[in-house]
């Protein structure tokens, strides 16, 4: 269930709020292959299904940056900011990949809006995110994302 902020003033009131948990999405071999094609990263551990079965994880795994890129569609399930003219991904303060995402795994995002600060023309938000793997003891990614919203 998404939280909606109607404008920057409402967004500021959400600082410190838990944003909840997204729905699960499956990380398929097709998604991994498409990401490999887009980035030119065709390392066997991602795209060679037979060889990867013999590798350290027993199956192909998603690229760490593929997992990170899925933060955006997962995050949009958690927070919808209306009444702004522009939404920009500003960057990341930190990212860690504690556990690989094996092909066929399902992941979801747990998010917290930790800060909302004024910037010229709008606000910058800081979101602490954990991308969980269904049934796994460690998350796929732990990150701190920065986004800007302009009035």
Image (spheres, rainbow, N blue to C red):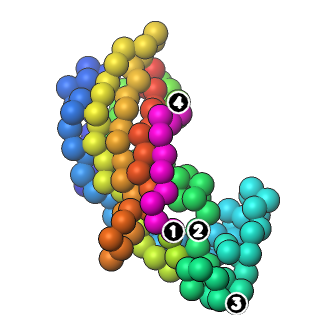
The answer to whether mark 2 and mark 1 are in CB contact below 8 A is yes
Q: Earlier in the sequence, mark 3 or mark 1?
A: 3
Q: Which mark is residue 62?
A: 2
Queried whether the magenta region covers residue 60, the answer comes back as no
Q: In the picture shown, does residue 119 fall above or below 84?
A: above
Q: Earlier in the sequence, mark 1 or mark 4?
A: 4
Return the residue at label 1. 100
Q: Secondary structure at mark 3?
A: helix
**Do we see residue 24 in this rendering?**
no
Depth check, mark 4 against mark 3: the one in front is 3
Q: Secondary structure at mark 1?
A: loop
Q: Which mark is residue 90?
A: 4
Instruction: For marks 4 and 3, give the CA distance.
Output: 39 Å
Return the residue at label 3. 50
Q: Earlier in the sequence, mark 2 or mark 4?
A: 2
Instruction: For marks 2 and 1, give the CA distance.
Output: 7 Å
Residue 9 relative to residue 104: left or right: left
Q: Earlier in the sequence, mark 2 or mark 1?
A: 2
Q: Classify residue 35 by image quadrant.
A: bottom right
Q: Residues within 10 Å of mark 3 (few under 14, many from 20)?
A: few
Q: Which residues are magenta?
A: 91-100
């Amino acid at each position: 269930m998404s939280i909606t902020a109607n404008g920057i003033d409402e967004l500021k009131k959400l600082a410190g709020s838990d944003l909840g948990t997204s729905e699960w999405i499956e990380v398929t071999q097709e998604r991994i292959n498409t990401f490999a094609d887009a980035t030119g990263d065709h390392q066997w551990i991602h795209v060679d299904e037979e060889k990867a079965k013999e590798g350290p994880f027993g199956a192909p795994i998603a690229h760490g940056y593929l997992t990170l890129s899925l933060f955006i569609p997962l995050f949009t399930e958690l927070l919808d900011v209306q009444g702004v003219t522009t939404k920009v991904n500003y960057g990341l303060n930190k990212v860690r990949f504690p556990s690989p995402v094996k092909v066929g795994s399902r992941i979801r995002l747990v998010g917290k809006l930790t800060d909302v600060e004024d910037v010229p023309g709008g606000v910058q938000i800081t979101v602490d995110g954990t991308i969980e793997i269904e049934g796994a003891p460690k998350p796929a990614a732990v990150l701190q994302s920065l986004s800007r919203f302009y009035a």
